[in-house]
Image (cartoon, grey):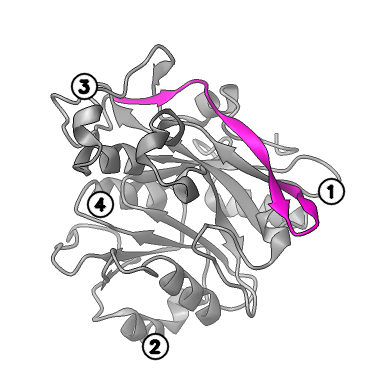
């Protein structure tokens, strides 16, 4: 279903807004639009909202519960404004999710458990947000796939991930870390310092006044924590071609990167077991 703009969607679809979890996909170009939507519909999201560039024609053969809205992906607040407006529009407690095109959410046991089951358990543990790691995917052969995107030959890094304490006004913040790794670490000379982190709070519950900040954190510090004070909690992974695509399409970096492959590259198996075995997400107490 197509809408003129975000105002049109928010005013016209109160029933959609009342039934989460809702996924928001910010499309920056026309790469892997259908696969991104299909993947998240398969996880069990009730509705998906895709913001797409005005010059990109949205897919026409998809589920009824997908909503398309023209949106400039290059404006400074391209992500934060629609996310924060959606937070304000839905009933408090509604679970929301956001990602970009060419990104695919995976969570523990997602092959046979739905996103609703995941979030029901997480809420029962008194958690209102879930840490996700952005795991870079890339095509091994950039000659065949010059934009670095290939689902069939996708690779990821098996190692090179690390975390540093997150500084606050009075010292390190409680249960918060800055996570690094993947292509943003290996090719950090081409990535601005404030964009090198790979952690996001991609899954969260709306509440009055909550706001997403440009650095993918929220203004409620408890939302930015990786676990509760008592034990480890669930985490998830957003497997993403976005960084590889940007590094190859950016004239300042493309000629310096003949290949993303290195000795720690692994074919991505598109399952949660591989990601858990690599330590890229945590099942917590959910067995």
**Residue at image location 57% in from the left, 72% down from the top:** 211
* In this rendering, position of residue 106 left or right of residue 131: left
User: Circle 3: is it few (<14), some (14-19), or many (20+) Cα within 10 Å?
Assistant: some
* In this rendering, position of residue 283 left or right of residue 137: right
Q: What residue would you read off at disc 2?
A: 11
Q: What residue would you read off at disc 4?
A: 33
| Up-down relation of residue 47 to residue 268 (above or below) | below
Viewer-nearest residue: 249 or 267: 249
The tag earlier along the polypeptide, 1 or 4, is 4
Q: What residue would you read off at disc 3?
A: 141
Q: CA distance from mark 1 to mark 4?
A: 39 Å
Q: What residue would you read off at disc 1?
A: 229
Task: Name the main secondary structure of what is drawn in magenta.
Answer: strand
Viewer-side label of 4, 3: 3
Q: CA distance from mark 4 to mark 3?
A: 22 Å
Within the image, what quadrant is residue 7 found in? bottom left
């Amino acid at each position: 279903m197509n809408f003129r703009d975000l105002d049109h969607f928010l005013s016209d679809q109160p029933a959609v807004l009342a039934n989460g979890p809702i996924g928001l996909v910010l499309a920056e170009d026309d790469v892997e639009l259908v696969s991104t939507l299909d993947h998240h519909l398969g996880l069990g999201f009730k509705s998906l909202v895709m913001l797409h560039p005005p010059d990109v024609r949205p897919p026409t053969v998809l589920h009824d519960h997908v909503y398309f809205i023209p949106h400039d992906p290059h404006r400074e607040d391209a992500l934060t404004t629609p996310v924060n407006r959606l937070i304000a529009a839905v009933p408090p407690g509604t679970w929301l999710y956001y990602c970009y095109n060419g990104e695919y959410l995976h969570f523990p046991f997602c092959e046979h458990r739905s996103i609703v089951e995941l979030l029901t358990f997480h809420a029962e543990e008194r958690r209102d947000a879930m840490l996700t790691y952005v795991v870079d995917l890339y095509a091994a052969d950039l000659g065949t796939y010059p934009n670095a995107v290939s689902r069939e030959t996708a690779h990821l890094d098996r190692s090179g991930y690390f975390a540093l304490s997150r500084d606050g006004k009075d010292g390190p913040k409680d249960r918060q870390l800055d996570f690094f790794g993947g292509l943003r670490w290996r090719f950090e000379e081409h990535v601005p310092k404030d964009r090198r982190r790979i952690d996001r709070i991609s899954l969260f519950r709306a509440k009055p006044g909550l706001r997403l900040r440009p650095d993918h954190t929220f203004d409620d510090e408890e939302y930015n924590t990786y676990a509760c004070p008592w034990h480890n909690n669930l985490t998830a992974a957003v497997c993403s071609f976005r960084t590889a695509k940007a590094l190859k399409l950016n004239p300042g970096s493309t000629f310096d990167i003949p290949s993303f492959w290195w000795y720690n590259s692994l074919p991505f198996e598109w399952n949660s077991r591989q990601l858990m075995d690599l330590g890229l997400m945590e099942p917590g107490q959910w067995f």
